[in-house]
Structure formats: structure tokens, C-alpha cells
């Protein structure tokens, strides 16, 4: 059964409070899945949150990436994975590419970006489902993992 682990990918300051940014790995028989990629550096447009990236904590040995959504603190490490399939809802990718200010576009579209767009619910691997969960963003998705004991939902900013 898949094992799920959290990895601290960055720290931000929001409303005067420290806000940790986690990424998640799902160890699946078909390969390790990474949910979100945190941040690996900063940009002037996000400096007001005093980001402290921890790129060394982001696992690299993954079969694929799932982005819950494409805000900068969830896709900032996508650039570490050129050629690796990155699963996202089609609406989320379209919004990230067209709405201002939505994200850091250079962190979404980079050399070797390999997005796999989904329209709604899909079983990505046996026991791992992508579920549309609009709210935080219109194209947001969560990950439902069957662990053998009870299902676990991994969601970013929900």
C-alpha cells in the first residue's frame, strides 16, 4: 500500500506568522509520486513574504508530479523536473497562463515542462485519484490515496 510522507519545501511569512510550505510524496509500486513542488528560489514579486526555500528537501527521484494548483508556492520547484509528467487540471493550467496576478509564469512554463492536462476526476495510478476541488482556485485538485486502511486526501491550501 502507498506510504505518504511530508517534506518541508519552504517557509513563508504571511500576516506576520510563519507559514510552512510542504510537498508530499506517495511511494507507490509504480514509482514515487510528488504532490506539489514548493519553491526553490524567490522573485521580487514574492519577496514581501520573506521566502526561505529548502530545495534540498524536495525529493527528485519521482515518476511523476501532481500540482494541486499552480500558485508560486506549489509549483516553484516544477523546474527541477524537466521531462517528468506534471499532472494538472486543464482549467488550472489555462488560468495560470492567462490571469494576472496568478503565479510566476516562468515557474509554470519552463524548458522541458511536460504537463498532462486532465478534465475532472481521473485514476492516475491504482489507488491514486485526482479529484477536482475548486475553491481556492477554479482548477484546484486534491489527491485521494487508498492506503489499505483508510483513504487519505492530500490537498494544497484546502
Image (cartoon, helix red, strand yellow):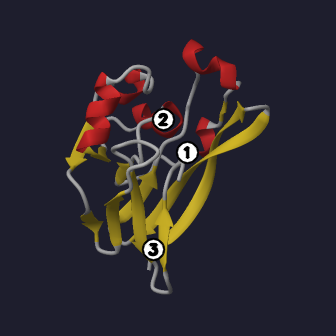
Q: Which of 94 and 145 is in front in this view?
A: 94
- Residue that mark 1 sits on: 58
Horizontal and vertical percent for residue 11? 69, 37
Quadrant that contains the N terminus:
bottom left
Give the distance between the C-alpha atoms of the residues marked 2 and 1, in whole angstroms. Answer: 8 Å
Residue 11 shown left or right of residue 116 in the figure:
right
Label 2 Cα crowd, 10 Å radius (few <14 / some 14-19 / many 20+): many
Q: Is residue 95 visible?
A: yes
Identify the disc placed on residue 2: 3
Identify the disc placed on residue 77: 2
Give the distance between the C-alpha atoms of the residues marked 2 and 3, in whole angstroms. Answer: 23 Å
Give the distance between the C-alpha atoms of the residues marked 3 and 1, in whole angstroms. Answer: 18 Å
Q: Nearer the viewer, residue 15 or 27?
A: 15
Look at the numbered discs 3 and 1 and tell me whether their residues touch, using CB distance below 8 Å.
Answer: no
Look at the numbered discs 2 and 1 and tell me whether their residues touch, using CB distance below 8 Å.
Answer: yes
Q: Can residue 113 be seen in this view?
A: no
Horizontal and vertical percent for residue 124? 27, 63
Judged from the image, the secondary structure of the residue bearing numbered disc 2 is: loop
Task: Please name the residue shown 23% across and 42% down the image.
Answer: 90
Label 3 Cα crowd, 10 Å radius (few <14 / some 14-19 / many 20+): many
Which is nearer the N-term, disc 2 or disc 1?
1
Residue 17: quarter of image: top right
Task: Please name the residue shown 54% across and 48% down the image.
Answer: 157
Q: Nearer the viewer, residue 52 or 103?
A: 103
Task: Please name the residue shown 54% across and 39% down the image.
Answer: 38
Amino acid at each position: 500500500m502507498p506510504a505518504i510522507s511530508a517534506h518541508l519545501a519552504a517557509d513563508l511569512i504571511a500576516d506576520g506568522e510563519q507559514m510552512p510550505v510542504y510537498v508530499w510524496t506517495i511511494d507507490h509500486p509504480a514509482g514515487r509520486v510528488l504532490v506539489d513542488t514548493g519553491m526553490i528560489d524567490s522573485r521580487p514579486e514574492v519577496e514581501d513574504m520573506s521566502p526561505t526555500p529548502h530545495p534540498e528537501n524536495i525529493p527528485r527521484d519521482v515518476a511523476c508530479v501532481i500540482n494541486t494548483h499552480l500558485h508560486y508556492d506549489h509549483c516553484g520547484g516544477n523546474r527541477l523536473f524537466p521531462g517528468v509528467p506534471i499532472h494538472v487540471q486543464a482549467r488550472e493550467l489555462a488560468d495560470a497562463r492567462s490571469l494576472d496576478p496568478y503565479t510566476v509564469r516562468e515557474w509554470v512554463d519552463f524548458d522541458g515542462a511536460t504537463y498532462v492536462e486532465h478534465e475532472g476526476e481521473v485514476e492516475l495510478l491504482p489507488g491514486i485519484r485526482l479529484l477536482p476541488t475548486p475553491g481556492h482556485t477554479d482548477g484546484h485538485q486534491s489527491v485521494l490515496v487508498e492506503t489499505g486502511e483508510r483513504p487519505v486526501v492530500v490537498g494544497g491550501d484546502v
